[in-house]
Image (cartoon, rainbow, N blue to C red):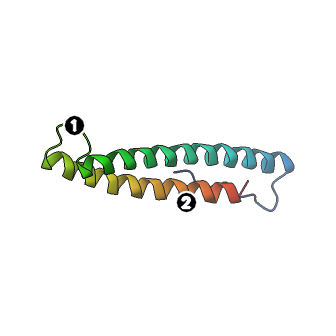
Amino acid sequence: MSAPNVNKPNEGIVGQISNSVSNAANYVSETVQGRSAEASKEANKEQAKGNTPNSGIGDRVSGALGAASDKVDESKHDSAASANKHNV
């Protein structure tokens, strides 16, 4: 998770541009990671529902736990992306 770079009062234009470019790159990275976590969460939800071939109770429990973990990751990446976007 990448924290946004904040412009300092005595930072020159080059430093400000560098921070903006870095924040933009971090925004894209966090957005992609958030979408990946979302896709994984949806796959795990289907597994938890038993909508996958040969899914036993252990597989369903594993899918439910995976979906919960992916939701936390998704929220974390979305928050980081938002912070970076507002500091571009």
* Residue closest to the far right: 13
Answer with left or right where residue 2 lies relative to residue 54.
right
Q: Residue at x 20, y 50 (%)?
A: 60
Dot 2 amino acid type: Ser
* Residue 28 position (above or below residue 87): above
Q: To which residue does mark 2 refer?
A: 79
Name the element at disc 1: loop
Name the element at disc 2: helix
Dot 1 amino acid type: Pro
Which label is found at residue 33? none
Give the crowd class for mark 1: few <14, some 14-19, many >=20 residues within 10 Å. few
* Residue closest to the far left: 57
* Residue closest to the far bottom: 9
Q: To which residue does mark 1 refer?
A: 53
Q: Residue at x 46, y 54 (%)?
A: 74
Structural distance between the alpha carbons of marks 2 and 1: 35 Å
Q: Residue at x 58, y 43 (%)?
A: 29
Answer with left or right where residue 33 lies relative to residue 4.
left
Q: Position of residue 86 (x, y in %)?
A: 70, 60
Mark closest to the chain's N terminus, 2 or 1: 1
Q: Position of residue 12 (x, y in %)?
A: 84, 51
Q: Exactly how many numbered labels are in the figure? A: 2
Q: Position of residue 27 (x, y in %)?
A: 63, 48
Q: Position of residue 32 (x, y in %)?
A: 55, 43
* Residue 24 position (above or below residue 87): above
Q: Residue at x 35, y 44 (%)?
A: 43
Q: Nearer the viewer, mark 2 or mark 1?
A: 1
Answer with left or right where residue 83 lies relative to residue 41.
right
Taking depth in this image into account, of 60 and 79 the one nearest to the observer is 60
* Residue 83 position (above or below residue 44): below
Give the crowd class for mark 2: few <14, some 14-19, many >=20 residues within 10 Å. some
